[in-house]
Image: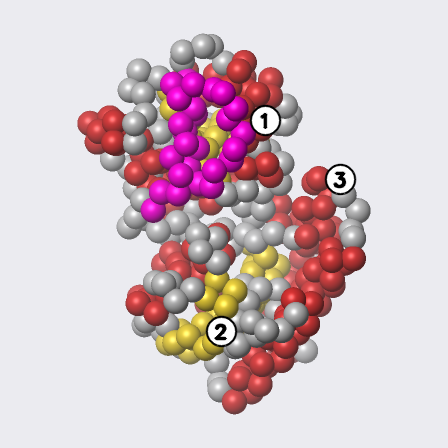
């Protein structure tokens, strides 16, 4: 098949970029011809090495407001000249076969209690048109599915629930000896429970709340490892309690070194760190508003309800005393492998084409 993937910009270390790489690699391994359309991408990006044809739409000098519409117009002209078997939007672009919904602007504003401003209204208008004019929408979680129906009026039959994939070639468990070695490699304490917080958006993902919860936990029993951008929130805390690891390219090894991965987000459309951590054999503590919580059972972690420091501390303390039995086939049984994800996207694309023909 000839596949077109459209994304306005590819940002270093971004979630969209990671998902895009998984899609390109998955489609290529399945023998498909992959074309990526973007207005901005880093020259040091590994995208070309994955074997995709890159189509650059130069819009760097265009003001941000009309940039989206010009990108969509350029994409439309290309689509008319070339016959693609499946077109997928990762950028709220209307008129393609599939639109990926990994978050909604209205849902985010509701979660933080803000009313839409002028810029927000522009983003929401783009989303509404994308969802109304795309043949089928892929929701990455039940949370996204409910927001599409409730906040955007998308009919249920136009939504396909497909969780984002995990690269099981990269994310998989290791034995206890390797775990201890990795703890020492990252400078983590062997005699404490290591709580991992991987993030580049610390306030939304709940780091201030986690720091409050840490003060409520028994002294000397836990340490917090933060992987990602520098939060600047530690104050004068001792390194014995909190460690900042910075950006880590081999994040899978940090998951393996940790005892618990903690994600108490205020708004999290999915939360790939949850499934990646579980795939590495490390249980999780997360909140009910995190989209990936649907995949967390008693064998994989603890999900708490009330978003307070006391509730989070209680959940961490409870999880630290539990014995979890994460199944080796967790990703396979939940359809989270890249291969299965590609199969489901192709099936959704065929359904989308059927909808278009019937219309």
Residue 354 in the image: above or below residue 187: below
Q: With respect to residue 323, does 337 lie above or below?
A: below
Using the numbered discs, state the Cα–Cα distance from disc 3 to disc 2 in whole angstroms. Answer: 35 Å
Q: Which residue is mark 3?
A: 113
Outermost residue on the left side: it is 177
Q: Residue at x 44, y 61 (%)?
A: 20
- Residue at the outermost front position: 236
Residue 170 spot, x, y in % from top left: 30, 48
Graded by Cα atoms within 10 Å as few (under 14), some (14 to 19) or many (20 or more), the crowding at tag 3 reads: few
Q: Quadrant of the C terminus?
A: bottom right
Q: CA distance from mark 3 to mark 1?
A: 17 Å
Find residue 12 and report its image quarter. Answer: bottom left
- Residue 139 on image: x %, y %: 58, 55
Circle 1 residues within 10 Å: few <14, some 14–19, many ≥20: many
Q: Which residues are magenta?
A: 222-249
Q: Position of residue 148 (x, y in %)?
A: 68, 54
The residue singled out by tag 1 in the image is 209
Q: Which one is nearer the viewer's eye here, 203 or 274? A: 203
Judged from the image, the secondary structure of the residue bearing numbered disc 3 is loop
Residue beneath label 2, please? Answer: 37
Residue 342 can be seen in this image: no
Sequence order check: which comes first, mark 1 or mark 2? 2
Residue 257: percent from left, percent from top? 31, 31
Outermost residue on the top side: it is 219
Residue 54 lies in what quarter of the image? bottom left
Q: Could you tell me how far apart the alpha carbons at marks 1 and 2 are, in whole angstroms?
A: 39 Å
> Which picture quadrant has residue 252?
top left
| Residue 302 in view in this figure | yes
Task: Give the SS element for disc 1.
Answer: helix
Residue 50 numbered tag: none
Residue at (58%, 28%) from the top-left corner?
A: 208
Q: Residue at x 74, y 62 (%)?
A: 122
């Amino acid at each position: 098949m000839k596949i077109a993937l459209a994304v306005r910009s590819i940002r270093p270390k971004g979630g969209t970029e990671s998902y895009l790489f998984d899609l390109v690699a998955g489609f290529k391994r399945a023998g498909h011809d992959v074309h990526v359309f973007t207005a901005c991408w880093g020259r040091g990006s590994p995208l070309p090495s994955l074997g995709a044809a890159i189509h650059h739409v130069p819009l760097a000098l265009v003001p941000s407001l009309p940039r989206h519409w010009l990108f969509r117009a350029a994409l439309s002209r290309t689509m008319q000249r070339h016959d693609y078997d499946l077109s997928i939007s990762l950028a709220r672009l209307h008129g393609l076969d599939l639109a990926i919904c990994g978050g909604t602007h209205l849902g985010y504003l509701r979660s933080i209690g803000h009313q839409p401003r002028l810029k927000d209204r522009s983003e929401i208008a783009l989303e509404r048109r994308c969802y109304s004019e795309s043949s089928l929408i892929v929701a990455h979680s039940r949370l996204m599915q409910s927001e599409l129906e409730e906040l955007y009026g998308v009919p249920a039959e136009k939504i396909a629930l497909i969780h984002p994939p995990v690269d099981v070639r990269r994310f998989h468990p290791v034995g206890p000896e390797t775990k201890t070695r990795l703890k020492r490699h990252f400078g983590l304490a062997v005699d404490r429970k290591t709580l991992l917080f991987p993030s580049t958006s610390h306030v939304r993902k709940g780091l201030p709340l986690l720091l409050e919860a840490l003060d409520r936990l028994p002294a000397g029993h836990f340490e917090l490892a933060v992987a990602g951008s520098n939060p600047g929130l530690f104050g004068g805390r001792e390194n014995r309690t909190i460690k900042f690891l910075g950006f880590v390219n081999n994040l899978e090894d940090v998951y393996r070194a940790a005892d618990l991965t903690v994600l108490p987000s205020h708004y999290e459309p999915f939360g790939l760190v949850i499934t990646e951590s579980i795939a590495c054999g490390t249980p999780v503590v997360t909140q009910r508003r995190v989209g990936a919580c649907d995949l967390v059972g008693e064998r994989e972690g603890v999900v708490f309800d009330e978003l307070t420091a006391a509730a989070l501390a209680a959940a961490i303390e409870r999880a630290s005393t539990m014995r979890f039995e994460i199944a080796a086939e967790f990703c396979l049984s939940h359809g989270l492998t890249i291969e299965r994800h590609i199969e489901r996207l192709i099936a959704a694309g065929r359904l989308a084409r059927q909808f278009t023909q019937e219309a």
